[in-house]
Image (cartoon, coloured by chain):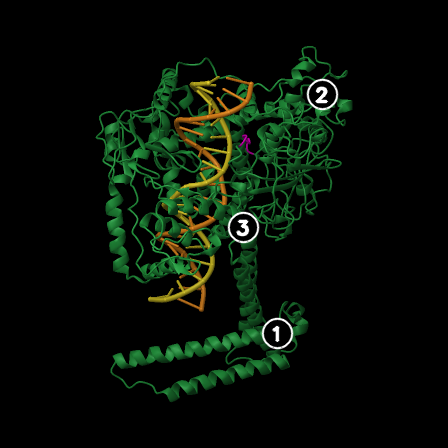
Chain colours: A green, B orange, C yellow
Amino acid sequence: MSAPSHAADGMAVVAPNFESTPSTLVTHAPQVDEDMSSSEDEKPLLKRKNTTTANGNGNGNGNQQSGGASSSEDEKPLSKKPRVSNGAANKKRRVVASDSDESDAGPSVKKEPEPTPKKVNGTAKPRSSNASAKKAPPPSDSDLSDSEDEKPLAKKAATNGKPASKAKPKKKAVSSDEESPNSEPSSSEDEKPLAKKKAPAAKPRTSSASASAASRKKVKAEVKSEDEDDVPLAKGKGKAADKKPAVKKEKKVKQEDDEEDDSYKWWEQDANGDGSVKWTTLEHNAVLFPPPYVPLPKNVKMKYDGVPLTLPPESEEVAGFFGAMIETDHAADAKFRENFFKDFKAVLDQYPPKENVKVKSLDKCDFRPMFEHFEREKEKKKAMTKDEKKAIKEAKDKMEAPYIYATVDGRKEKLGNFRAEPPGLFRGRGEHPKKGTLKHRLRPEDIIINIGKEAPIPKPNIPGEWKGIQHDNTVTWLAHWKENVNGNAKYVFLSAGSSWKGQSDRAKFEKARELIKHVDKIRKDYTADLKSKVMADRQRATALYFIDRLALRAGNEKGEDEADTVGCCSLRYEHVTLTPPNIVTFDFLGKDSMRFFQEVEVDAQVFKNIKLFKAEPKKKGDDLFDRLTTSLVNKHLNGMMPGLTAKVFRTYNASWTFQKQLKNTPKNGTVAEKIAAYNTANRDVAILCNHQKSVSKNYDVMKGKAEDKIRALKYQRMKLRLQLFSLDPKIKKKRPDLAADESDMDDDFMERHEADLLEKALENAKKKFEKDNVKLEEEGEKKKGKGDLDERLKEIKAEFKELKKERKSRKVEPRRGVTEEKLLEQINKMDERIATAKVQLGDKDKLKDVALGTSKINYIDPRLTVAWAKKYDVPLEKLFSKTLREKFPWAEAEADASWVF
DNA sequence: GAGTCAACTTAGGAAATTCGGA
DNA sequence: TCCGAATTTCCTAAGTTGACTC
């Protein structure tokens, strides 16, 4: 897998205003943009613009200073100034342009230069072997003075050369002369671990988890009742609020109505958005357990050292898990094999093969007979008739029907995942130390259900009793268990389209919109804090800068038994490298072990800070932000805006960027062109959020085919041209543009292409012959003989001989009935088809490693899509699939064409 | 105040389904 | 109508956040 390799793509299909950012445009959080439109929203933040967008030459290093805006504008918040993505060719994303303290344009980024494996394997990340080693010694405060920024981090900590204590050091002051703080902690405090602020007054906790949750929620419940939280932000927002349809308060529909109508329009109610009590009555059937294991036919056996093994069902099932995967990458992965084999051996110890063979090496295990059996079964399934398939589906639906819906306060609501996860091998991503581990089969005894007090207790569909039954109406899960591999909790929730999820989704976007009002101040604050004399503050400011500008995730600490992935706060020394004067290169594995690789031009102060945070004695494996935790960041943010956390910036920046980029929609374009603009905006957001997908295995084959198709079109064009010249040799002078040969039209290709065409023509002739005969027979007429077919095939071959002659002579006789006019028209059409095919191929290439769905589902306010669809008269179903429409009914109801984020 | 846990959101890959062109 | 490609849905892993405990 690789990080999107946008650096290479230089496709020129760009929306207006995007000229500099052909394809890889790494869109950014609201950022300075070349097209400073008159609207307030688009005013530049800074004097300096994003170079990459400004010069349009794809060179991110170009003009960092572009005195577009007045100095007064410099002070303007980024939020007012959506950033523009940079182009494919742009090597860098500029975050901030100069030493100036003023905030500025968004970063210009260079994406990974070349595709590299998305999941970086084995490239052992030098990670401290224990948590304590992760914390580097604290730098001395004096290092923080401006003049001293360049100096390495505190020597004092360096003396012992040992990694700092596990705890993050406490807030530390800078004792610079220039910035001498009067209330800074003494240096002795430097040694103290960073404080994670304590939770507010501890509440008595009961011994059971559910009881404690309940007590916790009770407190919340008391707070609730005041609708404040539920008031949509937009109500208080001039423009946006004004535009909102007046549906909200109007109707206080009685619930009974909703019971009739499946679609409960919670957004029309004064529903509790984030209150504590989530339901009053709740009925459901908990989970559906998978059917018990069915042993394989007796003749299907794995082999060990060539000997077929007769395994008891218990061990055969586990063998089958691996057997089904032998042709996947997992089966070749050393860690996966190691973990699987460890668990497999343990099962074999308990359920050994009849043959009494001791299985000692995975290499001697041959699961192929099992694999082939599974393949045959798949084929059989595929080969079933429509009716057979239908019958199976009906039986399955019938069995699942009772589990699909829950009844919440009398309303039918769909469940998300009602199936208990089947046993299998844990498919941890990236270098997960537990990948390959056996995931046990769940039993009712593993599962706690959460259900209304009055509701009938569901009976598990397999023998056994639930582990527990609780009636906690402050949570939204219906069933819960702990998986055996990592000890993680798993839940059954309602579906994405349910009112619970809808409400929290809407609240999430409203929170992001609320940030618009605060973001200027927040940016000003962290920009000032970049120079703070307190190390912790300076680190926090720098981290916030990245969270805001680069859409980094918060980055919690992770355990040793998890994949080594990081986010902002957990970045380590080796994840950022500095290239003077102001380029920071990020290279780390983020969530899901997705590589984040970007070269970013940053504010000079940020550059200085990173240098400081990396200074000796810090070394590989040490935390970059050794005085920072996610909870400190979030505490700080919460102080600036209630409910603000690091992740809100991703939502905010994603939606903001999307809104900005949608402005490039061609007003008079076709629906297809508008959708292309929409997808481009979507892609910008996906790149901003680093949403990747692995390039499909046969992408190159696909691309080759598409290229051949384009060449085939060019071949046709050439034939048309040559006919034209035969018809009117003078036209070459009249239309010199037609005189030029098509590119990529070498003899080799033409020969190959003609051979392909001949083969197809012969094939088609044979098919037609057979088809005609069937028809003749049906009509009771005499069938054609083989001689007829041979005759036809002969004709075709002769025609193709002609092609060869034409190729050699570069002359084509005009086909019967053609005229110059017709040929010109055909050539024009061919040109269009070639152009379209090229654009399509380019688009495919640009999107081959970018996943659009994640941002559409989670980050882009759906009201933006609804409003855009209305404004540009594009059917919503072209943008939202059925499930997305089910997920966002509230957006459809709320947003009109003028809705803005 | 560090560590743990509960509850929820976000995420990519696999499987299923639909689409579209020959 | 068939078949491969594209899109959608399903599945479950992997995050974030904040409360709670020790």
Q: Residues within 10 Å of mark 2 (few under 14, many from 20)?
A: many
In the rendered structure, the answer to whether residue A666 lies left or right of residue A140 reads left
Q: Answer yes or no: do the residues labelled 1 and 2 have beta carbons within 8 Å?
A: no
Tell me the magenta residue range: A553-558
Q: Are marks 1 and 3 on the same chain?
A: yes
Q: In the displayed structure, does residue A805 sit left or right of residue A408?
A: right
Q: Are marks 2 and 3 on the same chain?
A: yes
Q: How far apart are the alpha carbons under marks 1 and 2? A: 70 Å
Q: Which mark is residue A748?
A: 1
* Quadrant in which residue A278 is drawn: top left
Q: Amino acid at mark 2?
A: Ser
The amino acid type, in three-letter code, at marker 3 is Leu
In the image, residue A470 sits, relative to residue A299, either above or below, namely: above
Percent across and percent down for residue A710 are 56, 65
Label 2: element kind: loop
**Amino acid type of the residue tagged 1 in the rendering:** Asp
What residue is drawn where x is 67% and y is 13%? A184
Q: Nearer the viewer, residue A619 or A82?
A: A619
Circle 3 crowding by C-alpha within 10 Å: few under 14, some 14–19, many from 20:
many
Sequence-wise, the earlier of marks 1 and 2 is 2
Residue A668: image x %, image y %?
52, 49
Q: Which residue is mark 3?
A: A847
| Few, some or many residues within 10 Å of mark 1 (<14, 14–19, 20+) | few
Q: CA distance from mark 2 to mark 3?
A: 47 Å
Residue designated by label 2: A140
User: Badge 2 sits on which subunit?
Assistant: A
**Horizontally, is A781 left or right of A815 in the view?**
left
Q: Main secondary structure of the magenta part?
A: loop
Distance between mark 1 and mark 3 Cα atoms = 31 Å
